[in-house]
Amino acid sequence: MAQTPLEIAANIGLTFDDVLLVPQASEIMPGEANVSTIVTKTVKLNIPILSSAMDTVTDGNLAIAMAQSGGIGVVHRNLDPVEQAREVERVKKFESGMVVNPVTISPNETLADALTLMEMHRISGIPVVEPDSRAKSGGRLVGILTNRDLRFHRDLETEIRKVMTKENLITVREGTDLDTAKDLLHQHRIEKLLVVDDDFRCIGLITVKDIEKAQRFPNACKDEKGRLRVAAATGVGKDADARTEALVNAEVRPEGSTTPLDVGALHGRAISLDQRGKVLSYKMTSQCASGSGQFLENIARYLGIAQDEIGNLSKEADDPEKVSSICAVLAETDVINMVSRGISSSNILKGIHLSMASRLAKLLKSTGAGDGVVMVTGGLAMDTGLVAALREEAEREKLEVDIRTHEDSPYAGAMGAALWGAFRHEKLAALGTLAKAS
């Protein structure tokens, strides 16, 4: 029985250099050959090549080259999870049909803030948006700030609204094809095209560079959003879960995101963040709502109890009294009526906590925080009664969130401001403009 070529090679012990392919005549032109292949049901490669997940082979640079050529690179795992996720994110952002949820800035910020963001994200322009509490992401577009706007301004404490380009903004709606986008960019001699929704909220960005890359590499391996595809090794070690979560978040997916819930003196604020701290959504309660620290402080004073006793008293309640009003003044009137009817302080406080928690849970839900970690911060973070009520209301709203607090939660805002100030100081010093900005 004749041996197959594979059996012959196995018996002889041939290596790669021992085998040559003999060319033969073919009627098929190279351009007509289809060498694409399927990796999974949803991932197609235009060339059948995957690069190895070795630290001497595939990093972000090779993964970019592989995807542009039509294959895919597997980023090695000899990095900590955060660094590996950054490599993946760098590939995903290197080329994209549309930058989804771009970095934005408020018109009230300064040029120093803008330069810091540009340096941090390695970008040359930032859409300027007014915060919109109704929006799940993005904000109402009011302008754009580019290097051209910054070129001749030396006072870095100038507000962005005084410098940004705000007239005749060139915008398109989501779904605009790249040919139309290219024509608009060429017609108006601009490098960035702002993508807005029906309410003029900035939801994306199309750049000249991305269009040029798409034309240079027509066979690039991309996902459904026009971003380069990349793979990453995870393994089965002790850091496998953390590594996988970081990689999932590098795809800019909301799963596993973190939401700080700041409950302070006047407002409740829910800020949905991705794994890298980018804001996905921001919502805030109204100032007059009976769901603030100041309101609870007033009630404690009226009931004649110390603030640090509120949480424990609330947890002793057996028949919480409902407080329905969202107006602080009317809610205080409700409490006065309860006291006159002989309702215990425990049941009053529990009722207030449930009322506050109900509004805060709805605030969380409006940010899209359906799962992940919710970290309670601000002055009321240590109110155990409020945190317990918040967990009850989150379950009632079917939010699969892990609500947590930390001993440093009351100081989160101050610590964040200090860290941001240190980062900004470092960047301005590197830019040589610290003296003018300080």
Image (cartoon, helix red, strand yellow):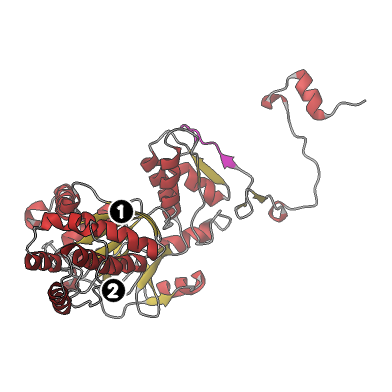
- Compared to residue 311, the image places residue 25 above or below, namely above
Q: Is residue 95 magenta?
A: no
Residue 143 is tagged as none
Residue in the image at 28% along x and 56% along y: 388
**Which residue is farthest top?**
12
Asked whether the residues under the numbered discs 1 and 2 touch, taking CB atoms below 8 Å apart as contact, a structural biologist would say no
Residue 277 is tagged as 1
Residue that carries the numbered disc 2 in the rendered image: 132
Judging depth in this view, the residue of 300 and 63 nearest the camera is 300
**Which residue is farthest right?**
1
Where residue 379 sits, quadrant-wise, is bottom left
Residue in the image at 35% along x and 51% along y: 275
- The answer to which of marks 1 and 2 sits earlier in the sequence is 2
Q: Secondary structure at mark 2?
A: loop
For mark 2, does the 10 Å Cα neighbourhood hold few (<14), some (14 to 19), or many (20 or more) residues?
A: some
**Main SS of the magenta segment?**
loop
Instruction: Report the span colored magenta.
Output: 50-57
Residue in the image at 45% along x and 56% along y: 95
The amino acid pointed to by label 1 is Gly
| Left or right side of 7 for 436 | left
